[in-house]
Structure formats: C-alpha cells, structure tokens
Image: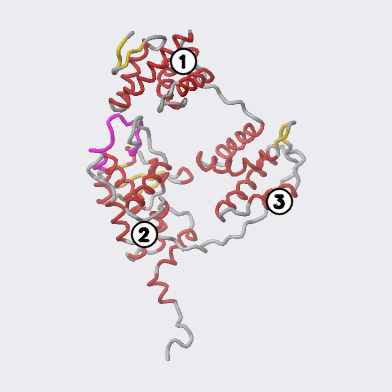
Amino acid sequence: MIEVLRSWVTGPLESYAPGFAAELARRGYTANSAAAQVGVVAHLSRWMLGERLDVVGLVEPVIERYMAVRRRAGYTNYRTSRALVPLLGYLRGLGVAPPPASPPRTPVEALLERYRHYLIVERGLGVRTARGYVDAVRPFVAGRSGVDGLDLAGLAAADVTAFVLAACPGRAVGSAKMLVTGLRSLLGFLHVDGVIPTGLAGAVPSVAGWRLAGLPRALEPGQVVRLVGSCDRRRAVGRRDVAILLLLVRLGLRAGEVAALGLDDIDWRAGEIIVRGKGHRAERLPLPVEVGDAVAGYLRRGRPATAEGRTVFVRVKAPHRALTSGGVTEVVFAAGQRAGLGKLYAHRLRHTAATTMLRAGTPLAQVGQVLRHRRALTTAIYAKVDRDALGALARPWPGALS
C-alpha cells in the first residue's frame, strides 16, 4: 500500500498510481483535480483486488460493473465510465490495459464509412464537411435497413422522392438543402459504386429557397464593445476569449479557422497570419495591432505551459487540448449572454466584420477577399447593409414629393 496525493492505493493499480499522478501534473491538472482522480483509482483498485482482477481485465463490461457498484455505494461524483478516461488513457499508453473495443459495424455504418471515404478521397471534401454529409443521409440509409440487410438494389425514384417529402417539412431551409444535397451525393456514390443500377440523383426534389434572400445581422459598434468588455482580462480564460472574439469580429474568421490557428501560422515580424479555411486552402491575412496584442497577451499570460499540440487556443481545464470549433462558438455564446445580447453565435461576428468594413468605405470586392469568398455572389448579400450606397439607387415614393 502506498500513499499518493492523500489517497492510500493498494491492489492491482498500486504500482501505477505514482506515474499516473505525475502524468496528471504534466497535463496541467490542478492539485485538487489530480487528487480526486487518484481517489477514484484507489477505490477502483480496492474493488479489483476483491474481485481478483488484474489490469488486463479492465474491459468495458468490467468498468460498467464497477461504476454500478460505485453508484450503489452512494458516491455523488465520478459515477460513469467517463471518470476513468484519464486512467485508461494512461494505462493504454503503457500498453498494460486492453484497447477500447470497437463497436460492431452494422451494414448501415459499413456503407456510410465507404461513403465518407469516397467524399474525402475521391471528392476532396474536408473531414468535418464529409461528416456533415454522412450525418445528413444516415436516416435515409437506416430506413432501407431490414432483417436481411440493406435493401438498396431495388431502390426506385419514388422511394427517394417520398423520403424527401416526409423528411423536409418542419426543417429550416438550410437544413433541408443540406439533406437534399447530401442525398444527391449519396445516390451518385451508390451508382458509381455499383450498388444501384441507375443514377437516381435526379429524383431528389429541390428545396424552395432563394440566394441572397436574407439580411445579414451584424452587431452595432457599441454592442461589440460590450461583447469584448464582458471578458475579464485579469484571468487567463478572459484573455483567451478576448483574442478569440477579436479574430472573429475584426478579421471575419470562421469558428473552425480560429480553432485551427496554429502557433506557426502567426508571422509576428510581417504582421500576418495564415488562415486554413475551407477546401484545404491556406491564405494570408494582415494581423491588426488590436488583434495581435490580444493574441500575444494570451500567449504570454494565458496559454498554459502544459498545453498539448501547437494550436494557439486550448481548453481552460486540463487536459489542455486544442479548442474545437464548437468550443469557439461556446466562447461567443457565453460572452453574448454576459453582455446581455441574447443568443449569439460565431458566424454573426463574421457578418459584423463584413458590415463594419463596408460602412468604413471598403469596396465589396475587397470585403470578399478578406472573407476569402470564392465567388463574388457570396459577398453580394452584404450590399444590402450598405445603406448609403443603396440610398443613391432608391427612387422616391410616388406622391411623396410635391
């Protein structure tokens, strides 16, 4: 029996406890969080000793059985298998614990995995985009599953049309368009792959929706000030959030582009950053002084020394892994709530950046360059918010002038 971080550890995990505690410290866990983790290890090790289990016996059914015991014992925290993720990761890294069991692949998932591979390798889509396509068409593929497997060979145009007509009502226009786009792509893949004898992409109905029909919603300058000011720059999390918000609202970056920003993507001498955007494109943008100061402040006095990887922005809580695009959106949402601006998401700050440039007299073509639009039509929607330019085109209302 040994004492590690105020816990006495005995049993099969005894020899691994000191190394696990050191690993937690290396990954940036606070003393209290690490002590709590080791406390779970001590409890698990005692249970394993009573059950005559070794480390190699830490398979998922055994873990679930232990967690059921822990819940019955009245523990109020660390009650699910997620609590053992740090320990299992450490033990698997040493090669002493069995790897996680792969879930059985159903015919649906096997087909979708082939489709995902086709999108990435053959069509050149990004991993996130391919996942969006797969998620969109999963209900269609699952609906063709039966006791004898997938029934796709007998798929007819009427089946495709009926699915779209049943699935689209109640969806937002964007969601419905994603569904039909993904379905056309899937049907093309099934034909190329020889699963269906004829191409059925033409059987997918179009969704009624018009480009440029909406109006971009931008924040007013005072609201931007409130949003950025809601972050406490005295704390590491506040310095991180300010840098994220300014990248979004001054440069119009997407959430995924902020999350992907690496330490090597910043050229401090040239005052530029490399933005890795859609379609695996890497483009340079100037780094405004205000934004650069915020990023530098976070790197000097906010980014933890135990951060994993080379991304600029990482999670606040250990393990300090790279922040995801969802994490960037959560930063914006939380700041919007603190500033009293209601529900706010990252893409609205991109609209704000475009609108601010237009109001400052930046030509529409240059706005498109900053936003890295491939087509001028994509940028054209911002012409609606340029009230001064539109005013010169407006004709007076009949009878308004004597």
Of mark 1 and mark 3, the one earlier in the sequence is: 1
Residue 97: give its label. 1
Above or below 307: residue 159: below
Range of residues picked out in magenta: 295-313
* Element marked by disc 2: loop
Above or below 174: residue 111: above
Q: Quadrant of the N terminus?
A: top left
Q: Position of residue 168 (x, y in %)?
A: 63, 52
Of mark 1 and mark 2, the one earlier in the sequence is: 1
Mark 3 → mark 2, Cα distance in angstroms? 41 Å
Of mark 3 and mark 2, the one earlier in the sequence is: 3
Q: Position of residue 231 (x, y in %)?
A: 28, 47
Residue occupying image coordinates x 33% and y 50%: 338
Residue occupying image coordinates x 46% and y 15%: 97
Q: As shown in the figure, which amino acid type bears the numbered disc 1?
A: Ala
Q: Quadrant of the C terminus?
A: bottom left
Q: Quadrant of residue 33?
A: top left
Residue occupying image coordinates x 47% and y 54%: 374
Which residue is denoted by mark 3 in the rendering? 161
* Element marked by disc 1: loop
- Assign the magenta stretch its main secondary structure: loop
Which residue is denoted by mark 2 in the rendering? 219
Q: Residue furthest bottom?
A: 402
Q: As shown in the figure, which amino acid type bears the numbered disc 2?
A: Leu
